[in-house]
Image (cartoon, rainbow, N blue to C red):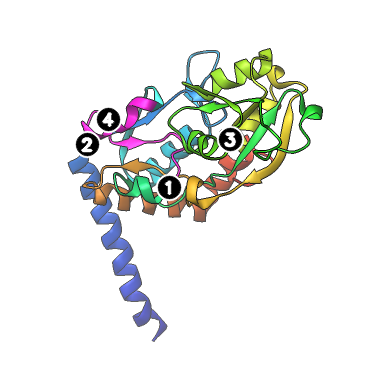
């Protein structure tokens, strides 16, 4: 009886594998875009190799999905246009899954959380990080992100600076040209743990406003590419189940993302 009950499940699994294999053959090369300027998620090694948690995670998902993915790098602010014009197929750059963005692109299931935290290199000066606490202070983050939307909405009393990348924001923070930088908590952790972030620390509580930061981070694709989204989701589920995701998480972070 049990064997008979399992047959539909086995058939469904085989069918899913066959569909993914067929999709891979039809899709050909899948171009996945990353920045290379968002450590520890996407950055270049001293030897010029693109790596990082998001980069390795995308490669693992593609492998598990049977897709032939190739990483390309470009500025974050050009990715949506490139996706629309079919110059790339996937945005792998920490994009938060929000209701607003869902109207424009399709997302995979959540690949990680999207909470934010302020970082300061003069942490003793800032015990709290609410809008009233930071009036008149210089606050910055990466432009065209949910972090930028958040500080523009709530920190109008601060001197807001927007940067092309978080690397640029952290450089100004380290040099004393910026009082606080808002970033994803894992990105802030990487900066704090680096030589450039010596003496810097998180300030205030973790920010998890779903209106701005959405349901987490996912890979973004064209809405017409539903089959590739389904294949990537299948790959993500596979690496979550077999321990690959946890191994990558533990390689980059001492906490779960």
Q: Residue furthest right?
A: 124
Picture residue at 39% right of the left edge, 42% below the top: 219
> In this view of the protein, can residue 74 be seen by the observer?
yes
Q: Is residue 90 magenta?
A: yes
Q: CA distance from mark 4 to mark 2?
A: 21 Å
- Check residue 28 in the rendering and tell me which mark sits there, or answer none: 2
Q: How many marks?
A: 4
Q: Nearer the viewer, mark 4 or mark 2?
A: 4
What residue did someone put label 1 on?
A: 97
- Contact check, label 3 and label 4, Cβ < 8 Å: no
Q: Please rate how many residues cluster around mark 2, counting C-alpha atoms within 10 Å: few if below 14, some from 14 to 19, many from 20.
A: few
Where disc 2 sits, the SS reads loop
Q: CA distance from mark 1 to mark 3?
A: 23 Å
Where disc 1 sits, the SS reads loop
**Residue 14, quarter of picture:** bottom left
**Image: magenta residue range:** 77-97
């Amino acid at each position: 009886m049990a064997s008979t009950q399992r047959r539909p499940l086995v058939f469904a699994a085989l069918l899913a594998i066959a569909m993914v294999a067929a999709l891979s053959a039809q899709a050909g090369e899948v171009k996945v875009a990353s920045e290379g300027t968002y450590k520890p998620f996407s950055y270049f090694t001293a030897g010029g190799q693109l790596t990082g948690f998001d980069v390795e995670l995308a490669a693992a998902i593609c492998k598990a999905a049977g897709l032939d993915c190739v990483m390309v790098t470009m500025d974050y602010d050009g990715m949506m246009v490139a996706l629309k014009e079919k110059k790339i197929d996937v945005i792998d750059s920490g994009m938060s899954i929000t209701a607003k963005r869902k109207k424009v692109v399709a997302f995979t299931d959540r690949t990680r959380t999207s909470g934010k935290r302020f970082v300061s290199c003069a942490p003793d000066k800032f015990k709290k990080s609410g809008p009233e606490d930071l009036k008149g202070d210089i606050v910055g983050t990466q432009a065209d992100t949910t972090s930028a939307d958040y500080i523009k909405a709530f920190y109008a009393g601060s001197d807001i600076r927007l940067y092309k990348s978080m690397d640029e924001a952290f450089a100004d923070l380290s040099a004393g040209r910026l009082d606080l930088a808002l970033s994803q908590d894992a990105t802030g952790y990487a900066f704090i743990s680096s030589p450039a972030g010596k003496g810097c620390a998180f300030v205030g509580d973790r920010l998890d406003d779903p209106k701005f930061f959405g349901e987490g981070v996912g890979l973004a694709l064209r809405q017409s590419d539903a089959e590739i989204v389904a294949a990537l989701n299948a790959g993500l589920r596979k690496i979550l189940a077999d321990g690959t995701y946890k191994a990558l998480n533990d390689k980059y972070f001492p906490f779960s993302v």
